[in-house]
Amino acid sequence: SAVISQKPSRDICQRGTSLTIQCQVDSQVTMMFWYRQQPGQSLTLIATANQGSEATYESGFVIDKFPISRPNLTFSTLTVSNMSPEDSSIYLCSVRPTVNTEAFFGQGTRLTVV
Amino acid sequence: LAKTTQPISMDSYEGQEVNITCSHNNIATNDYITWYQQFPSQGPRFIIQGYKTKVTNEVASLFIPADRKSSTLSLPRVSLSDTAVYYCLALNTDKLIFGTGTRLQVFP
């Protein structure tokens, strides 16, 4: 199993500013992912955070808007840049210890942009 | 990644068995079926996974027919605490792509 700590748990931000969300895992994992979940909706994969290289982004998400760092196998950050009210959402970090094991999720960061 | 289709919502009463069916007509040979549960204000949690026939654990059973074009998650004797969104995924890669999910509401 894996225990994930996400910070902050929630924040209210002014439009035009940026917020960095941290994800800390209690064990080394190869696969780490960032998701967005808008109220009442399903999860949408933003990107795969690759250790030692650039993140791999899904269609509709770009590095300039959502820069991701993955300095080691236990930590990653997601930055939401130049925020607008449309970025108000829950952002979740997820890990999979191996491709054949279940995924574990953090509690999420509830972001409100005003 | 195979697309999955499941009912948007279901209602049940405490003590009943709930069966949630998921359609995955274009499932690939290497895909396996996995289900996750999500409570409000929490991240999804793994429930069960299978490739074919029947899998059972302490939480649920998963039935997969021979053609694997659908699967059924069975929750025995649900309680109020089973109220959640249930996601069906068919995958064989590292990343999880979530569909719409089924919102299960359990009434007393």
Image (cartoon, coloured by chain):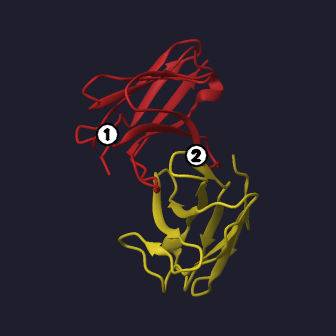
Give the residue displayed 49% in from the left and 82% down from the top: A65
Which class describes the residues within 10 Å of circle 1: few (<14), some (14-19), or many (20+)?
A: some
Residue A3 is left or right of residue A102, and the answer is: right
Towards the viewer: A71 or A24: A71
Q: Which chain is yellow?
A: A
- Residue at 47 percent across and 19 percent down: it is B18
Q: Colour of chain B?
A: red
How many tags in the picture? 2
Chain under label 1?
A: B
As drawn, B15 above or below B90? above
- In the rendered image, the quadrant that contains the C terminus of chain A is bottom right
Specify whether A7 is left or right of B56: right
Q: Earlier in the sequence, mark 1 or mark 2?
A: 1
Residue designated by label 2:
B44
Q: Name the image quarter holding residue B80.
A: top right
Q: Amino acid at mark 1?
A: Thr
Amino acid type at mark 2: Pro
Residue B5 visible in the displayed image: yes
- Residue A16 in percent (x, y) is at 57, 87
Residue at the (35%, 42%) spot, across then down? B31
Q: Position of residue B67 (x, y in %)?
A: 24, 27
Please tell me which residue lies in front, B42 or B108.
B42
**Which residue does the numbered mark 1 point to in the structure image?**
B5
Tell which of B16 and A27 is nearer to you.
Answer: A27
